[in-house]
């Protein structure tokens, strides 16, 4: 049974600050890691993917991966109210099956 | 560009009734998925179809059946609905496998009374 752990929150961050979202996973075979964002009442959308240890930056978003510690994080710089959403972590192992999603962290950016 | 289209958007059933959730994608994707999302439980995979002609069970398949009708369409059937199946159902597709970006439909809110 693959397990993905995320702090459900809510995580409250002032506008303009850095939001840090964390995720741990149990499957050591996981090779790919994805962060999806889900606004309330909407469907998830992919915002970041990371495959190698280290950091990957895309605009205001940085994904960090440490496979030895089975830990992946998402940093959001210069947080905006529009970043308020639930962020879902999804590691993926081998095989053709779908992603295993964490329960998500509810992020609130305070104006 | 429609992407992934799910119907219906809302449905109320009585316990024991049956229904089929429809999903179609117009992106020529090979892989399609059905997830359910419950408060506090996150997204859980019900069934998936890695490619046309194949279907496999996910994490929570009990009480559901699926049909990959063709490359575009992947339906989810509840034969005898139970209150435990009250949930939001999402269909998703990817070009090939879950290493690719998943594109989600807008979801179906299902209530079983």
Image (tube, coloured by chain):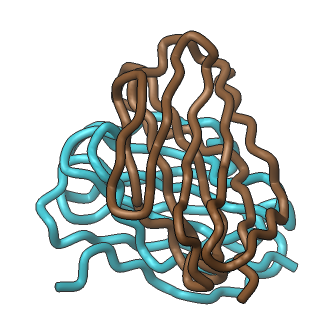
Chain colours: A brown, B cyan
**Which of the image's four quarters has the N terminus of chain B?**
bottom left
Vertical arrangement, residue A9 with respect to residue A42, above or below: above
The total of numbered circles placed on residues is 0
Along the viewing direction, whichever of B10 and A49 lies nearer the viewer: A49
Query: Eyeballing the image, is A94 above or below B30?
Result: above
Dividing the picture into quadrants, the one containing residue A16 is: bottom right
Q: Position of residue A105 (x, y in %)?
A: 72, 57
Q: Position of residue B100 (x, y in %)?
A: 27, 44
The quarter of the image holding the C terminus of chain B is: bottom right
Q: Position of residue B62 (x, y in %)?
A: 69, 43
* Residue that appears at 52% across and 17% down: A67
Viewed as shown, does residue A79 lie left or right of B75?
A: right
Asked if residue A70 lies left or right of residue B75, the reply is right
Residue A77 horizontal/vertical position (percent): 52, 63
> Which residue is at a point 78% across and 52% down the rendered structure image?
B41
What residue is shown at x 66% (from left), y 79% (from top)?
A15
Given residues A30 and A62, the one toward you in this image is A62
The residue at the point 42 percent across, 63 percent down is A60
């Amino acid at each position: 049974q693959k397990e993905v752990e995320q702090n459900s929150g809510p995580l409250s961050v002032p506008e303009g600050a850095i939001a840090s979202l964390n995720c741990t996973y149990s499957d050591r075979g996981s090779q790919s890691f994805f962060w999806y964002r889900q606004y309330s009442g909407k469907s998830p959308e992919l915002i970041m993917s990371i495959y190698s240890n280290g950091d990957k930056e895309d605009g205001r978003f940085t994904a960090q991966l440490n496979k030895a510690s089975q830990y992946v994080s998402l940093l959001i710089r210069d947080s905006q109210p529009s970043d308020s959403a639930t962020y879902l972590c999804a590691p993926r192992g081998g095989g053709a099956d779908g992603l295993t999603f964490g329960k998500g962290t509810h992020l609130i950016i305070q104006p | 560009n429609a992407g992934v289209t799910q119907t219906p958007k809302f449905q109320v059933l009585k316990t024991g009734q049956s229904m089929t959730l429809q999903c179609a994608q117009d992106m020529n994707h090979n892989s399609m998925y059905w997830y359910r999302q419950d408060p506090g439980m996150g997204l859980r995979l019900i069934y998936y179809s890695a490619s046309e002609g194949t279907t496999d069970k996910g994490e929570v398949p009990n009480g559901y059946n699926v049909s990959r009708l063709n490359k575009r369409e992947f339906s989810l059937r509840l034969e005898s609905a139970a209150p435990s199946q009250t949930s939001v159902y999402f269909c998703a597709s990817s070009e090939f496998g879950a290493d690719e970006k998943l594109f989600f439909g807008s979801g179906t809110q299902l209530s079983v009374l």
